[in-house]
Image (cartoon, rainbow, N blue to C red):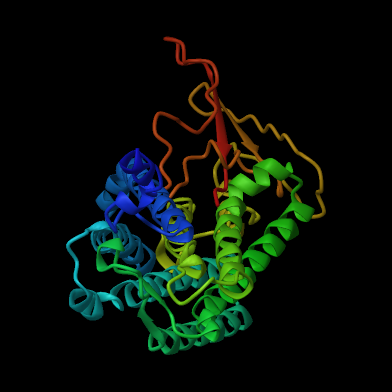
């Protein structure tokens, strides 16, 4: 009778091994890290075809180099960190030699992401010197803040080494590690929004298309995850030195920042040299096109000085029994939809399976027919 009562008083949790008997916050941390690994693996798989297409392009500008740096180093980092986090055979001595690996490598990867944002935002502002100075200064401040903060990490004193090797901050102010990136990505998100709405005022487009065309959803995702992570660092209060609640979102913030930045690179229109072009920009046809058209016999100038509306000009001439015509688009006519023009950085701006032009009636055997020439000025 007494044996049965003593057995009933035993707490079942006390029978668990230390690596399963985890505090609530540490247990949540491990579950969330599994979600982080799932996101990283899925994104790596999904982007594989576009990664290969980009690799086959001839040019190797800075943004392409940064893409493959992030593409290769991000999975390597989090595979190694996952081993240290879940391997029950890691000792305290091993962890003391390893714990700085994640904060240092994450700082490098996030700084490369910031450099990509700098190049891209500078490009959409037509390489503005003011934008370059502003973002360059913020990037320098970010690198300094993250480098200083790395020196104030320590091994989180978990109950047992088998519960995982985790790096945590010694002091609350070490959260400046994420203040620098959050400030930088807030600025780039704001600049990208401003540039998009500026182009929308000139060339109206729906908000949904505007967001997808300019990748505002990608900039926004980077900003949101970094802001949430920073709030965890400065608002959430840990229950003790062994509590890992402050760093619970850190890995997810790093992974999403890297994956969204890679998608920003892949969404660039045309070449990646100098950050690519801006989808909302427009330019008038060049004077060279006008002069060339004016010099071709039988081709009339489709636009004259002071013309503001569309012009369709036909000027027939006798040339081997045929007539020649010219149709030229007006200045300021919207270009083809951004989502159908194929000008992504992964295909070099070539639209496969499409032929631009307008063809008149086929020539007859007698040699009498109509030839229509269409001149288009492409961005």
Which residue is at a point 52% across and 29% down the rendered structure image? Answer: 319
Quarter location, residue 314:
top right
**Viewed as shown, does residue 362 lie left or right of 74?**
right
**For the view shown, which residue lies furthest in the top direction?**
365
Q: Position of residue 269 (x, y in %)?
A: 49, 52
Residue 278 percent location from the top left of the image: 57, 58
How many dots with numbers?
A: 0
In terms of depth relative to the viewer, which is nearer, 314 or 4?
A: 4
| Of 349 and 83, the residue lying toward us | 83
The residue shown at (60%, 59%) is: 224
Image coordinates for residue 126, horizontal then vertical, percent: 59, 70
Q: Residue 312 vs residue 292: left or right? A: right
Q: What residue lies at 38% left-to-right and 57% top-to-bottom?
A: 22
Query: Residue 251 vs residue 377: left or right?
Result: left
The image quadrant where one finds the N terminus is top left
Picture quadrant where residue 100 is located:
bottom left
Q: Is residue 336 above or below residue 10?
A: above
Q: Nearer the viewer, residue 86 or 127?
A: 86
Residue 59 visible from this viewpoint: no
Closer-to-camera residue (323/190): 190
Q: Is residue 369 something one can see in this rendering?
A: yes
Q: Is residue 95 left or right of residue 103?
A: left
Quadrant position of residue 316? top right
Give the vertical position of 81 relative to 375 (above or below).
below
Q: Position of residue 295 (x, y in %)?
A: 56, 49
Q: Residue furthest front?
A: 1
């Amino acid at each position: 009778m007494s044996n049965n009562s003593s057995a009933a008083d035993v707490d079942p949790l006390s029978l668990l091994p230390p690596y399963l008997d985890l505090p609530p916050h540490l247990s949540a941390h491990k579950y969330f890290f599994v979600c982080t690994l799932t996101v990283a693996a899925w994104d790596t798989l999904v982007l594989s075809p576009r990664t290969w297409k980009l690799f086959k392009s001839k040019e190797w500008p800075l943004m392409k180099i940064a893409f493959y740096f992030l593409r290769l180093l991000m999975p390597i980092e989090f595979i190694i960190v996952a081993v240290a986090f879940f391997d029950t055979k890691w000792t305290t001595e091993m962890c003391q030699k390893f714990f700085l690996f994640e904060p240092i490598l994450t700082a490098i990867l996030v700084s490369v992401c910031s450099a990509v944002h700098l190049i891209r935002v500078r490009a959409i502002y037509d390489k503005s010197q003011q934008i370059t100075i502003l973002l360059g200064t913020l990037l320098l401040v970010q690198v300094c803040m993250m480098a200083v903060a790395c020196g104030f990490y320590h091994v989180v004193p978990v109950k047992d080494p088998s519960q995982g090797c985790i790096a945590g901050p010694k002091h609350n102010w070490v959260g400046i590690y994420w203040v620098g990136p959050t400030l930088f990505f807030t600025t780039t998100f704001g600049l990208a929004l401003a540039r998009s709405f500026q182009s929308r005022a000139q060339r109206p487009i729906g908000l949904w298309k505007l967001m997808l065309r300019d990748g505002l959803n990608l900039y926004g995702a980077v900003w949101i995850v970094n802001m949430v992570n920073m709030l965890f660092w400065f608002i959430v209060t840990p229950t003790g030195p062994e509590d890992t609640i402050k760093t619970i979102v850190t890995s997810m913030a790093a992974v999403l920042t890297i994956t969204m930045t890679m998608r920003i690179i892949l969404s660039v229109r045309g070449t990646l040299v100098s950050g690519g072009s801006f989808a909302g920009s427009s330019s008038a046809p060049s004077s060279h096109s006008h002069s060339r058209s004016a010099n071709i016999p039988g081709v009339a100038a489709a636009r004259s000085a002071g013309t503001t509306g569309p012009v369709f000009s036909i000027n027939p001439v006798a040339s081997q029994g045929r007539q020649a015509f010219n149709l030229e688009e007006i200045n300021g006519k919207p270009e083809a939809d951004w989502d159908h023009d194929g000008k992504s950085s992964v295909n070099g701006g070539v639209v496969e399976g499409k032929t631009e032009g307008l063809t008149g009636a086929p020539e007859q055997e007698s040699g009498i027919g109509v030839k229509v020439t269409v001149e288009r000025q492409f961005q």
